[in-house]
Amino acid sequence: MDKCEFLPSGEKVFSSPDVFKIGTDSFFLADFVRAGKSMRAIDLGAGTGVLGLALSKRVKSCLLVDNSEAAYTLINKNIALNGLSERYSAMLCDVSKLPAELNDAFDIAVTNPPYYEDGSGKMPATKEMAAARHGDFKSFITAAAKVIKYGGLLFAVCPAQRLFEFSEISSDAGLSIKRIRFIKKDSKSSPHAVLIEAKKGARQGVITEPDIITKEL
């Protein structure tokens, strides 16, 4: 049964615990995003739409893309629930097969992509959860590079140990990482995730912001 939850930003979201779980990484990433009310956004691999919906007060419009029919249904339900049908829309599509008319159409792209390698832990209970946890985030970076304008921004989260891999893929796609912020359980532990801002067509040069310590929140 779908469950209705309130996001920290105030939006309401229906989620299905057996299919898609709402993780704190999306909330941290939403806060990390630099957006403006004239900006068009796209959420790649949107799941239930949490990340894109959390930006609803800060962007002009948002297209939420997912290749799961279950996700697509929930996204449309959540768009209607929050009264965003005039500014928000959903697309059922694999990010590697986005139509050409979306190229250079967006100011920002946001994504919390699948990034756990196969075999790293217990198999998720459903195919939707498996898709959300396991996958190659290269297709999400490549798709973002195509759909954002020159000078546009990609905001993403990935495991800290895969930051250099993310950077190499981004560079090959014409994106330069400009800002990062690590997420740690406590001040003594190693970071388990990193928030990333990458810019299309920018020079190299990275700003590292203070770590997020989840135990203190």
Image: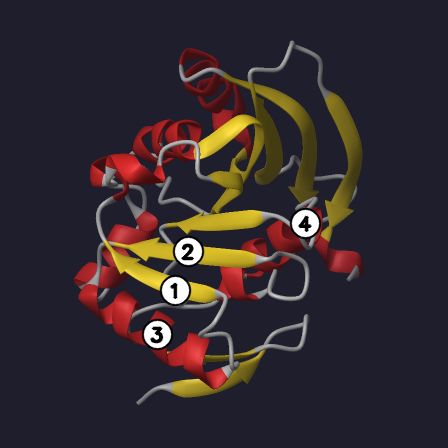
Residue 47: x %, y % from top left: 36, 61
Mark 2 touching mark 4, by CB under 8 A? no
* Left or right relative to 158: residue 47: left
Residue 14: x %, y % from top left: 42, 81
Task: Pick whichever of labels 3 and 2 is earlier in the sequence.
Answer: 2
| Residue indicated by mark 4 | 185
Task: Give SS at disc 2.
Answer: strand
| Residue indicated by mark 2 | 63
Mark 3 touching mark 2, by CB under 8 A? no
Task: Pick whichever of labels 2 and 4 is earlier in the sequence.
Answer: 2
Q: Quadrant of the N terminus?
A: bottom left
Q: The disc labelled 1 sits on which kind of residue?
A: Ser
At x 36% / y 33%, what residue is drawn? 103
Neighbor class of circle 1 (other Cα within 10 Å; few <14, some 14-19, many 20+) is some
| Residue indicated by mark 1 | 89
Mark 3 touching mark 4, by CB under 8 A? no
Neighbor class of circle 3 (other Cα within 10 Å; few <14, some 14-19, many 20+) is some
Q: Which mark is residue 181?
A: none
At x 56% / y 15%, what residue is drawn? 201
Q: The disc labelled 4 sits on which kind of residue?
A: Lys
